[in-house]
Amino acid sequence: MNADAERDPWYASWFGEEYLALYPDRDDLEAQRQAEFVFGLLAPYAAKGRGGILDLACGTGRHAVVLARWGTPVTGVDLSAHLLARARARKNAPAPGFVRADMLHLPFARDAFGAVVNFFTSFGYFDDPADDVRVIAEIARVVAPGGAFLSDVFNAARVLSTLVSREEKTVAGERVSIRRGYDAATRRVEKRITMGTGPGARSFRESVRVYHRDELEALHRSAGLRVTAAFGDFDGSPFDVRRSPRLILLGVAGGSK
């Protein structure tokens, strides 16, 4: 990794081919199941805004293309040009729109969308927790009155109690070493991924701030979003702090903003 990459935030360099290779299970079949559950929740809210559904941090667009199949307008937003190129290469009709943008500064008008969804812990990336507050406020800004935001993060309590500190695996014929830890001072789960060996090895970092349910609900309330449901996975099971792999919150925007 060069000096410029070290200065950039970790997410600026990580979400490319190596990321896709490391998580092959995050495929279109998985996305189909998850998007069906999400659309069932968000369909009543999507019509509240002219833009329909915003898939925030959409990655390769695998959820967005499924959400668009029901005829609701869908827009996918991501910071990674590489992942967005993959998304735009999908041949689907109707096709979602895809926009490159920073979630801190969404290029959309106030009340533009009836619903926003944020899959797979694409939250808590920023070093400054105040930026997470700004992200929630920005989401609330683009959600129309009576619309909804569906957030999906890992269940912090379960992740911390089952954290595997060292892992070695082979991915696409290449040796991969993963080191994980929890920094109590910053409240971040830190992961260092080394792909390959010797002079050609590439090193990447993941760093995500831990949020428990009460903290996330407080962030929602501060932005004017009332949490009306909490799920533990995409099967619709109720959230259980000891067992659930995910924390999925449905926050509804007030009737006037």
Image (cartoon, rainbow, N blue to C red):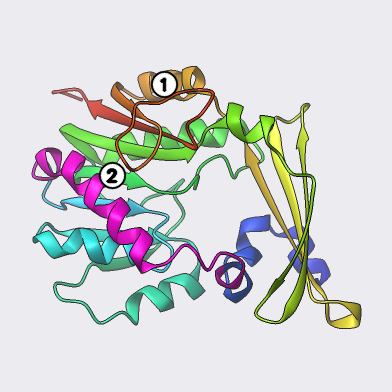
Residue 181 falls in which quadrant of the image? top right
Q: Is residue 246 left or right of residue 51?
A: right
Percent coordinates x, y for residue 196 in the rendering: 80, 76
Q: Is residue 137 above or below residue 1?
A: above
- Please tell me the numbered disc located at residue 116: 2
- List the residue tagged with mark 1: 217
Q: Quadrant of the N terminus?
A: bottom right
Q: Is residue 138 highlighted in magenta? A: no
Identify which residue, 207 or 172, lies in the foreground: 172
Give the spatial CA distance, label 1 vs label 2.
Answer: 16 Å
Q: Determine whether 215 is above or below 10 in the image.
A: above
In this image, 211 relative to 141: left or right? right
* Residue 24 visible at all: yes
Q: Write down the region rendered in magenta.
A: 20-48
Position of residue 8 measured from the top left corner of the image (x, y, whole percent)? 70, 59
Q: Quadrant of the C terminus?
A: top left
Tell me which residue sits at (42%, 78%) in the image: 85
**Dominant secondary-structure state across the stretch colored magenta:** helix
Count residues near mark 2 (Cα–Cα under 10 Å), then give few for <14, some for 14-19, many for 20+: many
Where residue 110 sits: x, y (%)? 23, 41
